[in-house]
Amino acid sequence: MDLKEGQIRIPSGCAVSAVISRQGNAVNGEKIVKSMIPMHERSNGLGGGFAAYGIYPEYAEFYAFHMFFDSRQAKIDFETYIKEFFEIVKSEIIPTKKIRAIVNEPLIMRYFLAPMKSRLADAQLDEREFVARTVMRINCKIEGACVVSSGKNMGVFKAVGYPEDVGEFYSLSEYDAYLWTAHGRYPTNTPGWWGGAHPFGLLDYTVVHNGEISSYDANRRFIEMFGYKCTLQTDTEVITYIADFLLRRQKLTLEETALVIAAPFWSTIAKCDKEKKDKLTYLRYVFSSLLITGPFSIILGFDGGVMALNDRLKLRSMVTGEKKDLFFIASEEAAIRAMEPEAENIYSPDGGEPIIVKVEKEAQK
Amino acid sequence: MKADYLYPEFEIIRNEALCTKCRLCEKECSNGVHAFLPEKGILIADSAKCVNCMRCVATCPVHAIKIVKSGADFTYNANWTSDVIREIFKQSATGGVLLSSMGNPKPLPVYWDKILINASQVTNPSIDPLREPMETKVFLGKKPSTVMRDEKGKMILNTPPSLELSLPVMFAAMSYGSISYNAHECLARAATELGTFYNTGEGGLHQNFYKYGSSTIVQVASGRFGVHKDYLEAGAAVEIKMGQGAKPGIGGHLPGSKIVDDVSKTRMIPIGSDAISPAPHHDIYSIEDLRQLVFSLKEATDYKKPVFVKVAAVHNIAAIASGIARSGADAIVIDGFRGGTGAAPTRIRDNVGIPVELALAAVDERLRQEGIRNDVSLIVSGSIRSSADVIKAIALGADACYIATAALVSLGCHLCRNCQSGKCNWGIATQRPELVARLDPDEGSERLVKLLTAWKREIKEFMGAMGINSIEALKGNRLMLRGIGLSETELKVLGIKHAGE
Amino acid sequence: MITINASTHDNASLCEMIKQAKDDVKISHCLGERFLGVGLKDRYIEIDGTPGNALGAYLNGGSVKVNGNAQDAVGDTMNAGTIVIYGNAGDAVGYAMRGGKIYIKGNAGYRAGIHIKAYKEKFPVIVIGGRCGSFLGEYQAGGLIIVLGLCKSEKNVTGNFPCTGMHGGRVLIRGDVSKITFPEQVSVGEATEEDMNTAMPYIKEFCSLFGYELSEVLGSAFTAVKPNSANPYKQMYVEN
């Protein structure tokens, strides 16, 4: 029997890209799909996906769950479970197009959910923690069900295939988002199912990532102490949980989060002034097990913005660029040029230097 | 009884053609093996007194001496080994409890040797440790569970008391009394130079070594020898010794013959009086009592110093460690059943406790399951022999290791395992001034520095090969390990896969 | 003297206030607060109520008075100073103490004076007015323990197994010891003049502290327990 992703750990190489409108304007999905074409060689057809933010304005106050089901039974089990804790405001099949390059698709659904007030009160949890725990429980316990994304006014579209084909499969030209991120995957094994494709999402956090990190099991075994369960054994999954833990639960800023996961070297810290040195030392002391080593370039999407980050040795490529309102991030400059031939200020961030772009109205909050 | 006479275990072979009759061997041997016969003009050896410490072999200027296992042995028997028979003879003659030194020498599994380390190939890069930064610094202490901020949103840097180590290796507890003044000086100076720590053991801290306090961990054991407020304040951390891998559940006993003037001062007991450490701490009969001692020590040191709790690896170690983690301790030291000792009942040493590798894996996993791994650091000891053992321990989940036997070997110990005699020819496990003088603190501390400098280089090589540039990212990173020739159960306890999986 | 009402502070802040106080301290309403007077070098602490465990641990010169009973591990590993208890003490009083004095008006629990030791000018003394539990002076390596048996009790003045592992110091027991079994490694006999001379200042101080007549206390005979050897376990081992 072939092992599914999650039962074994599969190293992957990848391509990533992103586009964000700083004014929060609509960017059509066609643009991000285009960015992946010049980076075709960085994928091998075994995984591609996109995250889109701002796509469900009419349901903006509900948690949008994108779901994969391996079987009808899995769907029934999921719905039975979810109805105990959430009100299902709307549920529908996510429209897809039959194309030759994409096969073996699971049942793909989306649900707009509102947590039941009484259940929330019983659990004595903050709403987002409640939703996060629900996601963990579904992914661990409900056979054949996979929560693909679970944030508000956003969603993840992914599949086994080349990213261009995945874009066509989901008809992404039908969606407008203020932020898109994209991923093309080069796994060393066949992942066996679609849940292993990227982006990986929890609440409104999504991660696309390139590189195989060497700290994986140190990070995983640490983060699992806090209720996260790494069911996929992928770097992207653990990085998403780390981001959620640091940003949502520890309330670190994005910059501080970058200082934890791509911490400056002790030799660099030693050269800082005392105040900075003390803070950097503190962050490394407290979160030593969340330092990520080995090559990575990450694009972290969240409600209202995006952060790009390279590992501290800069072992993976990443470039940024901009044109007017739009800001671009990609593994290769060509991907940016595919989206905007006239892109300006092409820049390669340093290792460990976070590039943070927020939608302006969000940034003003 | 005639049956008790045995042909000596070792034989001295002297190459008469080389021997110049300089009689150095005679001077060097505290066991009185070598003797000069003036009438014949030759040196003879009483092999029965030889413990195979190789002092004479190493010091003979013309290399005329070798020591060999005598080969005169009982009829081969895999069950009734010659050791077993010899021990029965000894006990039949004396009625005494067998007393041994150093770690368990029995051929029990050494799991370190059945664990293999990973390296990067293609999917991610290895890193060249000679040319790119490679961090081995670790901190020992509690980690705050949440980041706090003041009303202006500024982070409150509430770092608990902690130790900073330049590499995850420290020198384990060995008391002044069980080892010599010069050996202690070597450890203290080396720890200071290396940016790590040594441990006083339960024998107090010699007045001359207070100056190395910032590199010293002061131990509080059940006998409370030399423990007073200044002592507690002198160290960088306080370690409560609940148990020792070589003799779990057994107290200590330094015979009065070793309580010479200076040792007496340091232990603060009269010269010649036995120093008996009770088996338990008599203020700790239960886990909540441990909390009481942890906090009374914190109270006595104004909450400025981390408090460690050292325990022997025993069957229920995971639950014990979990209890210690909840007792307020800042670090747990787990000492495995191969750990060394100056003297322990042979039967206890060889039969009680479990290997540190299994104990470490079980403890680290349990503390994570309970979500309290961040409340304590884990330090392991009990036969850490090389940088490879260190790397494997860190990847299994340790924060740092303690070494003791390895440090003594660096100082010249030849593992003859006769520490209890107090006649150590290498000046280590002895209080005889003429023997102690043989260990030069300048040379000894330099050797220790060299040893750990070499280990640090090797640790960096291992890390670089794994594509890890900070030791933090190796801690508990069990995917970097594979077992070889281990059973399903062993793999499960270690939390690692088999090679090839 | 500064007065602190213990009931209005948590344990940690109470300890901190005692440490910070420049003056003597009187603590009222004490109810189980631990570590009072830990490591105290000078100054005087008086406690009304029931102090918690490890009272005066590592005491280094100050003095502590308790108007009531004390719990376990009083004067643990103390080095110098005085603790006076106008009531009973719990288990392991004076554990591993090296110097200083502990006076208890009433009874002491199990393992009183366990592993007390003396060193040079340091000479620890424990005087127990009543009786004590088993394992009195276990592993005693030095110093003096006096048990007066002044409180009426059906039980023997000491519990079982007194002085096991004793290898230094003295234990003096007032009154009838005929029903007490001592271990082999100690010698038991009528207290000599020298024994009584050593003990007298402490007996006198006990009397003046707790209002006893010296003549009443000296009215019964004292038995002295001394170790036979400073190395009681030497013969037990054979080098292997």
Image (tube, coloured by chain):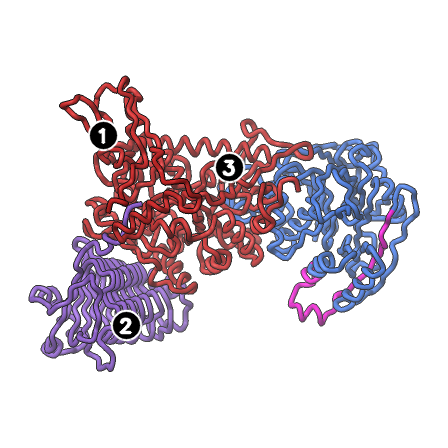
Chain colours: A blue, B red, C purple
Q: Position of residue B224 (x, y in %)?
A: 30, 55
Q: Is residue C43 visible?
A: no
Q: Residue at x 34, y 51 (%)?
A: B345
Q: Are marks 1 and 2 on the same chain?
A: no
Q: Nearer the viewer, residue C98 or A155?
A: C98
- Kindly report which numbered mark, 1 or 2, lies closer to the viewer in this rendering: 1
In this rendering, position of residue A233 left or right of residue C126: right
User: Which residue has dot 3 on it?
Assistant: B388
Which mark sits nearer the N-terminus, 1 or 3?
1
Residue A88 figure quarter: bottom right
- How packed mark 3 is, by other alpha carbons closer than 10 Å (few <14, some 14-19, many 20 or more), is some
Residues B286 and C101: in front is B286
Rendered image quadrant of residue C31: bottom left
In the image, is residue A77 part of the stretch drawn in magenta?
A: no
Q: Is residue A126 magenta?
A: yes
Checking the image for residue B34, the label placed there is: 1
| B276 lies above or below C1 | above
Magenta stretch, residue numbers: A104-132
Residue A116 visible in rendering: yes
The percent position of residue B103, horizontal first and vertical second, equals: 39, 44
Q: Which residue is mark 2?
A: C133
Q: Residues within 10 Å of mark 1 (few under 14, many from 20)?
A: many
Foreground: B255 or B147? B255
As shown in the figure, which amino acid type bears the numbered disc 1?
A: His
Q: Is residue B443 above or below residue C17?
A: above
What's the residue type where badge 2 is placed?
A: Gly
**Cα gap from disc 1 to disc 3, whole angstroms:** 40 Å
**Picture coordinates of residue A319 (x, y %)?**
73, 34
Tell me the subunit letter for badge 3: B
